[in-house]
Image (spheres, rainbow, N blue to C red):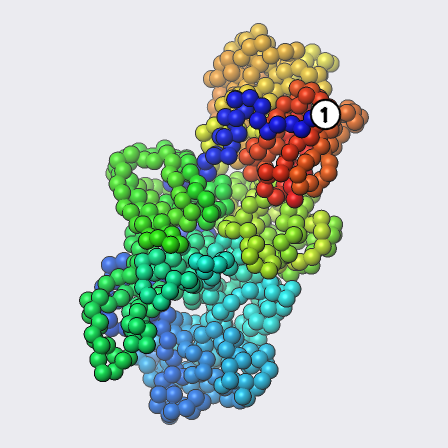
Amino acid sequence: MRILQQIITCGIIIILMQSVNAQVQIDIDVSTQRYIGNVSSLDRTKFFTLHSGGGNDADVAKFFKEFNVSPGRGFWSPFAYAKSKTGSVGRYPAFSNSNNTRVRKVNRSVATDHPKNVFRYNLDKNKAANWTVEYYKNVTNDSGRPEFYEPMNEPFIRSGDDVFSSEQPDAQKVRVRMAEWFGAIGKKIDETPELAKMKVIGYASAWPSMELGDFSHWNSRMKMFMDVAGKNIDAFSVHLYDGINVTGQDNKRSGSNSEAILDLMETYSFKKWGVVKPHAITEYGGIEKGYGDNYSKAKSAISIKSINSILFNLLDRENRIAITIPFITPKSTFSLTASNNYQPYTPALWRPLSITPTNNPNKPILGDWTFTEKIKFYKLWSDVKGKRIFVKSNNPDIQTHGFIDDNKVYIALNNLDSKTHKLSLNMLSDISGFQKLKIKSLKIFDNADPKYKVTQNNSMLDAIELIESETVVLEYTFSKALSFNNTLHNTNYYSKKYLQKINKNAEISFVFNNVKTGEGFASLKMAIGRKHNRSKTPVIKVNGTSIDIPSNWKGYDQRNRKDFFGTIDIPFDAELLKTNNTITIKFPDNGGRISSLILSVDRLDKAIIVNPPVDSQLISDGVYTIVSTTSNQRLLSNAQENHNVKMIDPGNNIDQRWVFTHLEDNIYTIKNQKTNRYLEVPFEKCENGENVATGPSVIGDHQKWKIISNGNKIYGFKPLHCQDKGLDRDGGGDGANTIIWNFNKSNKNQKWKVIPAGNRAIEGDITKEDVVRVYPNPAKNMITVKGISSGDRLLVYDILGKVNIHNIADSSEEILNISDLESGLYIISVPGKEKIRFVKK
C-alpha cells in the first residue's frame, strides 16, 4: 500500500490543469422570454434611483434625464413640517377640514424622517395618524406627496436614545410602541380614499442581523414589527450594507446573507397572510472605512462594489420589490463646512471644485460642481432596459441578468468571488444580423482608482474574463428587432414552516403543494443560521429521492461573522417534482436553524437545449441505468437474449446497469455490468434498423458512442462509426430490441435519461469486494479507499463536477492525500464500481 500521487503522467497534469482553470459557463437564450412571477419588463424606477426626493436643482434634473434615473428618498415629513410651525414634537397645526375628495396624485419617491422629529412614547399614535392624513391631503401639493411614506428612518436603533428613554427606559417597549405608530398611520391612510395611491412602508431596519441570539433579533425586531404593524404596511423596508474596512475584515450582506434576510421575511409574510408582501430596500450599499477624511477616487468608488453585488440579487425579485435605493446622495452640502475641512460627503454624487469660505463656516460659496466616482455606477447601467431573457450561470458567484429591447440585447455579469473567473458565453439560439458589441466594464479596487472602460467589438465574444468584483454590461446590436419563441416562468413556492431547529439525524419535512410542473429547472433556496463548524451539506430528499448538495454559494464564506447566515441554492432535476411535494432535510449534527426553505421552479413552454462547455464531460464516469424518456423502460443485455440490447421494465438486476467510461470529447465506452460486454453495432453496420447488441471487447469505433445533450438531462447516443445514426427504441414498442436509425433530436424514441445506479447492492449480484469503501469519513488529510483493483482509475470530484484528483490505483487498498481540498462534499468514482461520497473537513 502507498500514498497515491495526485499527478501520475503528463497527460493527467493537463487534465488537472483544465479542471482547475475550467471556465464558468454562461448559457444565453435570446429567444426565451423570462418572467419572474408575472413580471418580465425591467422597471428602472424600482432600481436605478438616487437617495434624493428630487427637488429643484438643475444639475439633479439633468442627471435624472441623461442617465434614466428616478428620485429615491428624501428627509421631510408631516412631522418635520409640524415641528417647523409649532416648535415642538406632538403639536400639529390646525386642520383645514377640506371637502375636496379628489384622489391625490403622488410622485414615485420615499419620504421619511428622523425618529426624534416624529415620535414620543407618551404621544397619541392616532392623533399622529390623523395629522399625517391631513398633511398629505390638504397641506402639501402633488409634487410633495410621495408614493411611499416611511414614518421613521431606522427607529429601532434609536429606541434607547435619551429623548425616548427619558419617558420609557425599556428599549423593547419603545420599539413596540414605534411599531404601533407605523400600524396606526398605515391604517389611517388605508381608510382615506383620497390617498389611495400612497403606500406606507417600514420599519427601515438598519442592521437586520436576524440570526443573532438564536434569532432573538428577528423575533424582537422584524417579526415583532410584522405582527404589530404588518397588516397595514404595504412593503417592509430594510437597509442592506456591506461593512467594508480597508484595514480590517468585511461583514458582507452581498450574496447569500442578504438572500437569507429577504427569504425569511418573505416566508413569514406567506405564513402570516398567505401572500408575500414586497420589499422596500430604502438604503443599500457599502460602508466606507479606513480611507481617511479627505476625498479620493478609491474612497468614493468602493461602495459601488457592494451596490452592484446587492443589485443583482434584488433584480431577481422584481415581482416582490416596491422600490430599491442605493445610498448615493446628491450634493449633500451639509458636509461642506469648515469643521469638515470642506470635504464632500462620501456617498455624494457631486462635489464642488470651487469652494470660497465666508463669515459663516457652514455656508461657503460653492461652484463648478463635478461628478464623483459614484457616477460610474449610473454610466454602467444607463442603457439597460427591456424584457428579461434566459441567462444562466453554472457558478453561484457569477451573477447574471439579460434583457432584450427591440434590436438590442443586454447581458449583465458580476463576479462576487475573490478571484478571477473566465466566462464562456454560450449562445443557445441561432442569431443572425449581428452588427456590433459594446462592452462596458467597471473594476473597483480597495486601494486604487476604479477603472471604467467602454470598448467596441465587431464580433461576438466566445469568452470574457472578470476579475474580483468586476461588473460588465454587454450590449449586442442586431440589424432587426429580435423576437421570442419560448417562455420561462419563474415561480417561488413557500412553506408554512420556518425557523426549524436542527437536531442531529432528525428529518425536517417541508410541504409544497399545487406546484406547476413541466420542462425546466428547479432549485431549493435553503437558508440556514449555524455555527461555522456545523455542516452545510445535509441529506435532502425530494419526494424520497436524494439530491446533491453544492459546497458553494453566493459570495464569501462569512468566516468573520459569529455565525453563518445565508441562503444556499440547491439545483435539482425538475423531473423529481410532482403537483404535491415533500422535501426532507437531515443534518449530521446539532445546532442552528433552517430559517426558510423556498422551492423555486423555472418552467419552460418547451425545452431549451443547453450544450455543455467546451471540453466538458457530459456524464461522469460511473455506473448508470439508461432509461427511455417515453416508456421509462431500461436497456438490458444478457446471454439469454443473445446479448441483444432490449427494453425492459425497471428491476433490481445488474444486467440493467451500464459502466460509462469517458474517452474524449464526450465519446464513451458503455459496458454492461453483468456480462462485461460493450454496447455496439455488430459488424460495423450503418443501415437503418440494424440491431444494437454487446460485444466482448472494444476493437473499433462501432463499440464507442458519442453522447450529446438533447434537453434538460436528456441525451442522444450516436455510434462513433456512423454519427448520422442514433440509438433508437425500435418503433416505440415496450420490450423492443434497440436499433440504430437516422438521428433526429425531435425523435422521442432516441431520447434517453442516464440515471446513476446508486450505492446499494442489487439482489446479490454485487459482492462485498465490488463495493468501494472509504474511511475515515469525514476526513481532514488522508482517506483510505478499499474495494478497488490495481489499474482502476480513481476520480475525486466536487459537487459541481470538477475533477480534483485523478489517479491510477496499484493495489486493492489505497491512501489518498486530500489535505489540499477545500472543505465540503466530494465523490469518488471508479468505473465499473459504485460511487461513494465523503466529506472533507
The image quarter containing residue 810 is top right
Q: Nearer the viewer, residue 839 or 609?
A: 839
Residue 380 in picture, x, y percent from top left: 32, 52
Q: Quadrant of the C terminus?
A: top right
Please give the name of the residue rendered at 59% of the width and 68% of the height, measured from the top-left corner: 217
- At label 1, counting other C-alpha atoms closer than 10 Å, the crowd grade (few under 14, some 14-19, many 20 or more) is few
Task: Please give left or right for residue 698 compared with residue 387 in the image.
Answer: right
Res. 43 visible in picture: no
Q: What amino acid type should be assigned to the residue bearing mark 1? A: Met
> With respect to residue 521, does 561 lie above or below?
below
Q: Quadrant of the N terminus?
A: top right
Please give the name of the residue rendered at 71% of the width and 40% of the height, measured from the top-left corner: 777
> With respect to residue 260, does 459 lie above or below?
above
Task: Please give left or right for residue 432 compared with residue 249 in the image.
Answer: left
The image quarter containing residue 340 is bottom left
Q: Which residue is mark 1?
A: 1
The image quarter containing residue 835 is top right
